[in-house]
């Protein structure tokens, strides 16, 4: 099973197991990772599952699509490696993925 | 805006799927409803968060979108002539001496009703507050999340943040009366209607507005009076001088005034029993995502069930002497008459 590491803003790191087919947001929620709110439940409608993908993993996670980019307008401190974790599907390719959660979702 | 109280059987707070279906269940019992919602249309989260998204767990619908579900419910409750009051939030509920309830909205509309049904989902949709340190201090005058009166912005130096219709519409509408307008957006692409984007670009071209690509990082000012905001672009930071800020970052759900109504809560949800879905206050009910009881599932179908049981108890309150005969819509001629079946 692909492992995913979530690193909180304060540096606390959580390594958890995901399942291919789930989204990174779902993996976070299932493991009670702090800092992922997912208010809309994964409909790409709220921007409260915002994460920063660790630079080295960007080529594998790919870029955000237009709807996700639109929704990122509602996030805060958006950077080049910003993604909504509900839009990243876990695959075996992503085994070892590292994402950082922002200081706060809003 | 009318200030004379509206008298009715039941006021339903929230016009999402559960609030709408409550109209149906109450309607079959000849109970009439007014609905109040903070949004400008029915559907609640179905309309605001996922109108186009498919829902797969509505009984008998293998797939239905949030908007289709809303439209179908509106069609289903039409025979009961529900009265809607949009763009309003209920701020106060008070029990009157005669046992009825008095409600007041933030638009000063008052209601007097026999029972209240809270079907407020995740709470009221409220504008998102950017997490800038100290922003609360400026909310009494400098920072606005909506435009209630355009005159508040006359002759002011405005900073408008966002790339959607609200940000662009207000950029276009306030530029003629403001002293200066600066628009800030994090990217060079706008979600707003193409026509508005073109008009905004024309203003920018003519030098009538300033535009910065970037994001807010700090608010400056003293004694609640804003003097400027730091905008961080990809390379540099600029300090934009302004005394009015309009940030448009969409909506979020907040429990809001519900927390002040004296109802027993369980972690921001309203505790109810599972027979009548009544709250700790006799005569006030809570159905759908906003309630809590052991085993609660936040599903639309659970809210529909709760609406049906709630309606029975409301009927017992409103028509205490009426003998209750349980009937099916399939076979009851009286129910079919109410539904307008010919």
Image: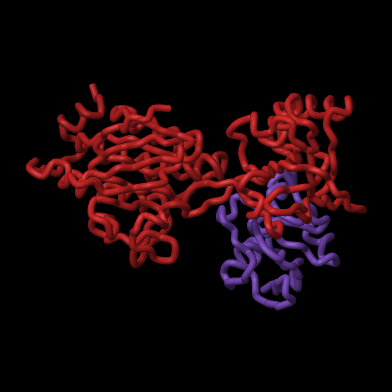
Residue B219 showing in the rendered view: yes
User: Residue B149, image x and y in percent?
Assistant: 60, 31
Extreme residue in the top direction: B342
- Name the residue located 78 percent from the left edge and 55 percent from the top edge: B217
From this view, report whether residue A32 is shown above or below residue B312. below
- Name the residue located 19 percent from the left edge and 40 percent from the top edge: B328
User: Residue A74, image x and y in percent?
Assistant: 68, 49
Q: Is residue B36 left or right of residue B158?
A: left
Quadrant (top left/top right/bottom left/bottom right) for the C terminus of chain B: top left
User: Residue B303, image x and y in percent?
Assistant: 36, 51
Which hue is chain A drawn in? purple
- Name the residue located 46 percent from the left edge and 45 percent from the top edge: B62
Q: Is residue B136 left or right of residue A78?
A: left
- Name the residue located 62 percent from the left edge and 71 percent from the top edge: A33
Residue A68 showing in the rendered view: no
Extreme residue in the front direction: B223
Which hue is chain B drawn in? red
Quadrant (top left/top right/bottom left/bottom right) for the N terminus of chain B: top left
So how many labels did they put on this image? 0
Instruction: State the scheme by which the image is colored.
Output: by chain
Q: Is residue B85 left or right of residue B336?
A: right
Q: Quadrant of residue B329?
A: top left
Extreme residue in the right direction: B235
> Which residue is more in the foreground, B140 or B13?
B140
Q: Quadrant of residue A86?
A: bottom right
> Which residue is more in the foreground, B258 or B311?
B258
């Amino acid at each position: 099973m692909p492992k995913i590491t979530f690193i909180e803003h304060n540096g606390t790191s959580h390594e958890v197991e995901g399942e291919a087919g789930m989204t990174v947001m779902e993996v976070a929620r299932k493991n009670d990772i702090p800092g992922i709110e997912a208010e809309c439940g994964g409909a790409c409608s709220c921007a409260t599952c915002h994460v920063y993908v660790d630079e080295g993993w960007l080529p594998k996670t790919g870029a955000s699509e237009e709807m996700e980019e639109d929704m990122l307008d509602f996030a805060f401190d958006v950077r080049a490696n910003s993604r909504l974790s509900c839009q990243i599907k876990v695959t075996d390719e992503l085994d070892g993925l590292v994402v950082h959660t922002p200081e706060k979702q809003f | 805006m009318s200030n004379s109280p509206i008298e009715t059987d039941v006021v339903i707070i929230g016009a999402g799927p559960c609030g709408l279906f409550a109209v149906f269940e109450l309607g079959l019992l000849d109970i009439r409803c007014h609905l109040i919602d903070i949004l400008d249309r029915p559907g609640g989260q179905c309309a605001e968060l996922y109108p186009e998204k498919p829902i797969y767990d509505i009984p008998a619908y293998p797939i239905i979108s949030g908007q289709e579900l809303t439209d179908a419910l509106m069609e289903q409750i039409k025979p009961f002539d529900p009265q809607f009051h949009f763009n309003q939030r209920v701020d106060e509920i008070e029990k009157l001496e005669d046992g009825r309830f008095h409600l007041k909205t933030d638009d000063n509309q008052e209601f007097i009703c026999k029972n209240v049904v809270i079907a407020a989902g995740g709470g009221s949709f409220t504008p998102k507050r950017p997490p800038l340190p100290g922003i609360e201090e400026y909310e009494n005058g400098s920072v606005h999340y909506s435009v209630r009166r355009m005159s508040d912005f006359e002759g002011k130096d405005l900073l408008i943040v966002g790339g959607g219709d609200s940000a662009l519409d207000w950029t276009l509408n306030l530029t003629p009366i403001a002293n200066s307008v600066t628009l800030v957006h994090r990217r060079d692409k706008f979600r707003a209607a193409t026509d508005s984007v073109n008009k905004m670009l024309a203003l920018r071209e003519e030098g009538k507005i300033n535009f910065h690509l970037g994001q807010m990082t700090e608010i400056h000012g003293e004694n609640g009076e804003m003097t400027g905001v730091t905008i961080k672009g990809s390379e540099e930071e600029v300090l934009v001088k302004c005394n009015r800020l309009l940030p448009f970052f969409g909506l979020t759900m907040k429990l809001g005034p519900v927390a002040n109504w004296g109802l027993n809560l369980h972690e921001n949800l309203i505790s109810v029993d599972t027979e009548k879905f009544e709250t700790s206050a006799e005569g006030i009910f809570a159905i759908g995502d906003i309630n809590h009881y052991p085993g609660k599932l936040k599903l639309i179908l659970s809210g529909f069930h709760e609406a049906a049981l709630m309606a029975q108890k409301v009927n017992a309150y409103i028509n205490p002497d009426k003998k209750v005969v349980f009937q099916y819509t399939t076979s009851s001629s009286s129910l079919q008459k109410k539904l307008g079946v010919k």
